[in-house]
């Protein structure tokens, strides 16, 4: 895409550990008319291919602790290989949100803190408005960066988004992305090891009507391609969907979720990765929900067999639970 004779492209590196985030992110980019490509493989050669064609590149990647070593190598190599006016790197994800300074020191230009659906397009527009000028200091909420004098800056947190206003999948470009459907984001528990409440706060939910529209798309998209369409979910605690009080499952809402989706000719996988459940939520009353789902097992986060460690984690349940 050209903007005032400036050709640019957003390049997002696909990784099997982090790609779920790209469904919503690329949908947001498409909504804003921002050109992007999702790619697999070597970042340096991919960027070089586009730069050699006269493109400016905004490179993006989602970071987790399991990907940090590879990310460091890529960012350091980028800093050596490309001019700062040709390539700008923007890193998000739980690792970047929890510990942004090392990633900036690796060579990233910006870190997105928390949700990226609004912050990333705003940052891209800022970069375009300033013609890829290096050492910019945008006052956009939800960012971290180093100034030209290596001062570490974190802008104020961004207000949380309404999940119902953002699409979780993308069919634009050459790399369609259909991750499991995110039915909730955030968590009311405060386990010490977990980034979810730090990044997203207390849970917010995608409405059933919105979920059904997404299921409808998934069915229409995949039914001609495969014999059986599977519907899976993303949730830090699937049995907490639409709960009004922490620790008390909203059984009617869960039953309606499963029953309405089952009206489609699909298989439903609820309570399996990546929609695990907390052990104390699995009660006699809740089991009836699973008569309509297709998984015969649940993914339960026990975390430890030690009551002392569970207590120190602030896990909120015991080994007995």
Image (cartoon, helix red, strand yellow):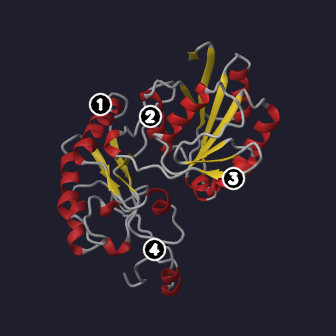
Q: Residue at x 30, y 72 (%)?
A: 247
Q: Of circles 3 and 1, which is in front?
A: 3
- Alpha carbon of mark 3 to alpha carbon of mark 1: how far? 47 Å
Helix, strand or loop at mark 4: loop
Helix, strand or loop at mark 1: helix
Q: Of circles 3 and 4, which is in front?
A: 3
Q: Which residue is mark 1?
A: 220
Check residue 152 in the rendering and tell me which mark sits there, or answer none. Answer: 3
Q: Which residue is mark 2?
A: 28
- Alpha carbon of mark 1 to alpha carbon of mark 4: how far? 37 Å
Q: Where on the picture, by quarter, is residue 135?
A: top right
Where is residue 8 shown, x and y percent of the image?
Answer: 61, 22
Check the image and report above or below for 217 versus 310: above
Say whether disc 3 or disc 4 marks the residue closer to the N-terminus.
3
Say whether disc 1 or disc 2 marks the residue closer to the N-terminus.
2
Q: Residue at x 33, y 51 (%)?
A: 183
Check the image and report above or below for 141 versus 303: above
Residue 77 placement, left or right of 217: right
Where is residue 296 shown, x and y percent of the image?
Answer: 33, 61
Q: Where on the picture, by quarter, is residue 256?
A: bottom left
Do labels 1 and 2 touch, CB within 8 Å? no
Residue 138 placement, left or right of 22: right
Q: Residues within 10 Å of mark 4 (few under 14, many from 20)?
A: some
Do labels 3 and 1 touch, CB within 8 Å? no
């Amino acid at each position: 895409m050209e903007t005032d004779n400036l050709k640019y492209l957003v390049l997002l590196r696909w990784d099997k550990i982090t790609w779920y985030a790209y469904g919503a992110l690329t949908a947001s980019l498409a909504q804003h008319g921002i050109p992007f490509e999702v790619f697999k493989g070597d970042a340096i050669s991919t960027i070089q291919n586009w730069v050699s064609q006269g493109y400016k590149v905004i490179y993006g990647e989602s970071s987790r602790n399991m990907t940090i070593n590879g990310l460091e190598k890529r960012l350091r190599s980028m800093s050596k290989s490309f001019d700062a006016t040709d390539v700008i790197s923007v890193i998000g994800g739980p690792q970047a949100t929890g510990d942004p300074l090392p990633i900036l020191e690796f060579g990233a230009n910006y870190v997105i803190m928390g949700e990226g659906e609004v912050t990333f397009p705003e940052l891209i527009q800022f970069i375009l408005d300033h013609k890829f000028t290096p050492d910019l200091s945008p006052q956009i909420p939800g960012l971290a960066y180093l100034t030209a004098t290596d001062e570490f800056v974190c802008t104020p947190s961004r207000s949380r988004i309404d999940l119902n206003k953002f699409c979780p999948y993308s069919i634009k470009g050459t790399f369609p992305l259909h991750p499991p459907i995110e039915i909730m984001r955030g968590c009311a528990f405060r386990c010490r090891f977990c980034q979810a409440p730090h990044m997203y706060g207390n849970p917010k939910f995608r409405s059933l009507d919105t979920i059904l529209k997404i299921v409808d798309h998934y069915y229409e998209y995949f039914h001609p391609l495969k014999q059986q369409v599977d519907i899976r979910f993303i949730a830090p605690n699937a049995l907490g969907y639409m709960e009004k009080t922490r620790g008390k499952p909203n059984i009617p809402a869960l039953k309606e979720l499963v029953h309405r989706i089952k009206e489609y000719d699909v298989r439903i996988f609820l309570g399996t990765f990546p929609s695990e459940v907390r052990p104390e939520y699995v009660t006699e009353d809740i089991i009836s929900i699973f008569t309509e789902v297709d998984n015969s097992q649940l993914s339960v986060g026990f975390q430890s067999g030690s009551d002392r460690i569970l207590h120190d984690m602030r896990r909120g349940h015991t080994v007995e639970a």
